[in-house]
């Protein structure tokens, strides 16, 4: 039996967003949409928009704020937002300098965001985008062609949000995004599945002693199941995988330890300690780090690890620049 704190499961996104703007009064829910937007906009600034299916909270609404996103478009649970919702967000935050879309690499997101871009351009709004594909676990999976977009998207949000606040033009942000995406790599694991409210049962099954490496943020399959490992062994597995799939020239990195929704902070810190010890042993210089629940999968237990190679010193400045977005 599913046990969740809900009213009607079909209304979960609408009611969640209503609660969100009650708590965070500096953002607004656009009328008749599932779009969270800043209440004030900066004239002459490129607007930064992201979004996707709900169920990944605090992504994406929690990252709307000064110096980060100008709007987030929230689809139904694990479902891409519709083009009309994305278009509403574009029109709401556009102030004349253009709009930039940060899209995670899922077929529905790519199709709908790009359709909204076309519609906005028909109305005279300049729009560009980047597709984030940081998940090195698998190539091609359910929901996507190529690599999936996961928690590394948060670093993209922050860098582009800061650049836009500092006055970067739309063409500058496009070039920056295309560079940053090649320096992001993530991989995750699960020890228990997620339950979508309207479905009412877990999306997959793991035995009491089993775990899965490379799981996606919608419960997509990973690359291997096996008996539950220790935190140190999991850290070795994930870091080995990241190193196998990247060919970066430096080892100066930002690190994101991301909880998948049901992993206690106690366990997140244990895992972080193991990873940071390994990174030091392997010659990495960790100059920025974050830990917590940022890109979740509802109530999945597990974590993801993101490395962001800081190939440009400006990127670290952007990460450190102030934002008032509630989830950062």
Image (cartoon, rainbow, N blue to C red):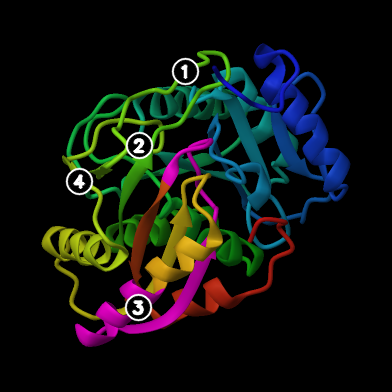
Asked whether residue 63 appears in the rendered view, the answer is yes
The answer to whether residue 310 shows anywhere in this view is no
- Residue 105 tag number: 2
Left/right placement of residue 310 relative to residue 239 reads right
Which segment is the magenta one? 273-301
Residue that carries the numbered disc 1 in the rendered image? 201
Task: Tell me the SS state at disc 4.
Answer: strand
Magenta stretch contains residue 282: yes
Q: Residue at 54%, 73% (x, y): give it.
A: 318
The CA distance from mark 1 to mark 3 is: 36 Å
Circle 2: element type = loop
Q: Are marks 2 and 1 in contact (CB under 8 Å)?
A: no
Q: Are marks 3 and 2 in contact (CB under 8 Å)?
A: no
Pick the front one: 255 or 5: 5
Q: Residues within 10 Å of mark 3 (few under 14, many from 20)?
A: some
Q: Residue at x 56, y 14 (%)?
A: 198
Mark 2 vs 1, N-terminal side: 2
Q: Residue 91 location, x and y as percent?
A: 70, 32
Q: Nearer the viewer, mark 4 or mark 3?
A: 4
Q: Which residue is mark 4?
A: 227
């Amino acid at each position: 039996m599913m046990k969740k704190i809900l009213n009607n499961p079909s209304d979960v996104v609408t009611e969640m967003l209503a609660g969100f703007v009650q708590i965070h009064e500096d953002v607004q829910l656009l009328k008749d949409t599932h779009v969270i937007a800043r209440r004030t906009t900066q004239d002459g600034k490129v607007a930064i928009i992201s979004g996707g299916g709900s169920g990944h909270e605090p992504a994406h609404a929690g990252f709307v704020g000064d110096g980060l996103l100008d709007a987030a478009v929230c689809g139904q649970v694990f479902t891409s937002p519709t083009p009309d919702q994305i278009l509403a967000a574009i029109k709401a935050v556009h102030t004349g300098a253009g709009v930039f879309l940060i899209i995670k690499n899922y077929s529905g997101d790519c199709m709908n965001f790009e359709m909204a871009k076309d519609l906005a351009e028909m109305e005279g709004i300049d729009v560009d985008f980047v597709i984030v594909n940081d998940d090195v676990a698998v190539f091609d999976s359910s929901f996507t062609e190529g690599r999936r977009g996961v928690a590394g998207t948060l670093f993209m949000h922050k860098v582009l949000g800061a650049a836009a606040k500092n006055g970067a033009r739309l063409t500058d942000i496009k070039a920056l995004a295309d560079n940053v995406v090649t320096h992001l790599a993530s991989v995750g694991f699960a020890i228990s599945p997620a339950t979508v409210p309207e479905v009412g049962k877990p999306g997959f099954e793991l035995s009491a002693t089993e775990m899965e490496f490379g799981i996606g943020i919608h419960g997509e399959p990973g690359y291997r199941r096996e008996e539950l490992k220790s935190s140190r062994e999991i850290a070795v597995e994930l870091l080995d995988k990241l190193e196998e799939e990247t060919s970066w020239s430096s080892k100066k990195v930002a690190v994101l330890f991301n909880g998948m929704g049901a992993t206690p902070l106690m366990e997140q810190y244990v895992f972080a300690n193991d990873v940071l010890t390994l990174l030091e042993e392997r010659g990495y210089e960790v100059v920025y780090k974050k830990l917590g629940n940022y890109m979740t999968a509802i109530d999945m237990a597990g974590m993801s690890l993101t490395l962001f190679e800081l190939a440009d010193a400006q990127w670290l400045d952007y990460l450190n620049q102030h934002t008032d977005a509630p989830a950062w």
